[in-house]
Image (tube, coloured by chain):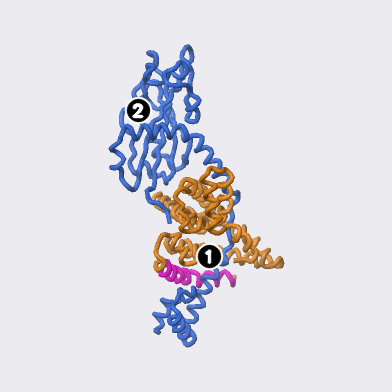
Amino acid sequence: MGVGEMPLEAQAFPGASQDRELVASCRTGDPGAFARLVRLHEGMVFNLAARLLGDPEEARDVAQEVFLQVYRMLGRFEARSTLKTWIYRIAVNQCHNRRRFWHRRGRDRQEALDEGVAGRARGAAEGAGSSPFEEVRRRERARCVQAALLELSFEHRSVLVLREVEGLTCGEVARALGVPEGTVKSRLSRAREAMRLRLLGRVEEGQTS
Amino acid sequence: MTCARVRRRLSEWLDAELEPSVAHAVSSHLSECADCARRAEELRAVSGLLAGLPRLAAAEPVAPGVLERLEIEAEERRPALAVLFRGFAAARPFMLPSLAPAALVLVGVLAGVLALDPGPLPEVHLAPGAWSAVPASGTEGNPLFPSDGIDLPREMAALDLSPEVLAGQGEGSVFVETVVARDGSVAGVTVLQGDADGEAPLLEALRQQRYTPVRYRGRPVAVSVYRLISRMEVRSPRI
């Protein structure tokens, strides 16, 4: 995780008391409060959906659905988990439903993600001297990793994205997926091994080409 | 510890989730076994690659679209749902418990009349959002209820709501307007709210509907029928 993103992370995931205040404001019908909630969390929801679905347009659509559902279910939020984890859970469910919908339609649409969007920001954070070659290599590596991710089952992909990409703890992943922590650990172990086997050849090719 | 047992524990070892004694045993094995040590390094590299993925950002912010849709929903649902749910529950008090737990399909008909025939008949278009603006039933300004000589159109056959027809719907709702022509056939179906994509089977089923022709003051008229078709996941993501 880039150093340059730290303040954003800290701002995007406020503590439990801030969660409660924000949710309470939304429940009282404060129109600005829900807008604030969406703006705080839309980045993480889009990133999660884009990584799970591999399609930026679908990810944006799902992100909208996620927040509509968040709005409708705010009354059920009981602060037993953080607002972030609760939203992650809704987002994973929405992505899962979308995948099943594609599956029923016999469609598996994926459009290439623009790995350069945040890659440029990362490059800037890591040092302005990164060469065009470095930039291309970084993109190619991200493309390989994303392609390998999409080959995994949804179960394995979601546990990996939440743990490794979003940086949740095993406990948080368990709450976000609604499964016991032991299940998360065993899924994580199998998912990492599946990813290792898929990435061994690919990333080396990407780096040497 | 054997290689196989160590490899099963590597993921937790990398996450520092093992008991200290087990973690120590794994570490000792790795210091002696080159193959397992390489495997551990590869798994660490996999984690690094995933963590190094750039964060993706939507081309346009999500918030404005969400707020706009909520505004539209609030505007359209306020009058429509109040009438719809009251009618549904009152008319079928014993139906709710028998609904399948996985999916609940609510169909309501909110009727308004669109008098397409110009002339002495008043031209009134009762839009969902305009409910509160409509004068009380039975008054001169709102002569559109059964008490005032007009029957609501009746479906000749129930709408097909089989799983195939509803397959396009996720958990969302779709609010549609059906214009019933003077002869009872469907002149058009418009999605007023909801995602029209993927709803083709449902819209086609709505187009195939036939109604009893509606007469007002002895003259056939076209009417608009509003329906909200919702499919709700009962499963709750409460944590």
Tell me: residue B23, above or below residue B166.
below
> Chain B rendered in what hue?
blue
Of residues A7 and A15, the one nearer the viewer is: A15
Q: Which of the two discs, 2 and 1, sits closer to the camera?
A: 1
How many labels, in total?
Answer: 2
Of residues A143 and B117, the one nearer the viewer is: B117
- On the image, which quarter does residue A155 sit in? bottom left
Residue located 42% across and 52% down the image: A97
Tell me: residue A16, above or below residue B12.
above
Residue B224 coordinates in the image, percent (x, y):
43, 26
Is A143 positioned to the left or the right of A177 in the image? right
User: Which labelled disc corresponds to residue A167?
Assistant: 1
Q: Quadrant of the N terminus of chain B?
A: bottom left
Residue A77 coordinates in the image, percent (x, y):
46, 52
Give me the chain that's orange: A
Q: How would you rate the neighbour count of disc 1 (Cα within 10 Å): few for under 14, some for 14-19, many for 20 or more?
A: some
Residue type pointed to by label 1: Gly
Residue B94 coordinates in the image, percent (x, y):
28, 37
Helix, strand or loop for disc 2: loop
Task: Give the extent of the magenta segment.
Answer: A184-208
Labels 2, 1: one chain: no
Of residues B2 and A58, the one nearer the viewer is: B2
The rendered magenta stretch, by its main secondary structure, is classed as helix
Query: Is residue A188 a member of the stretch shown in magenta?
Result: yes
* Residue A152 visible to an observer of this rendering: no
Residue placed under numbered mark 2 in the picture: B210
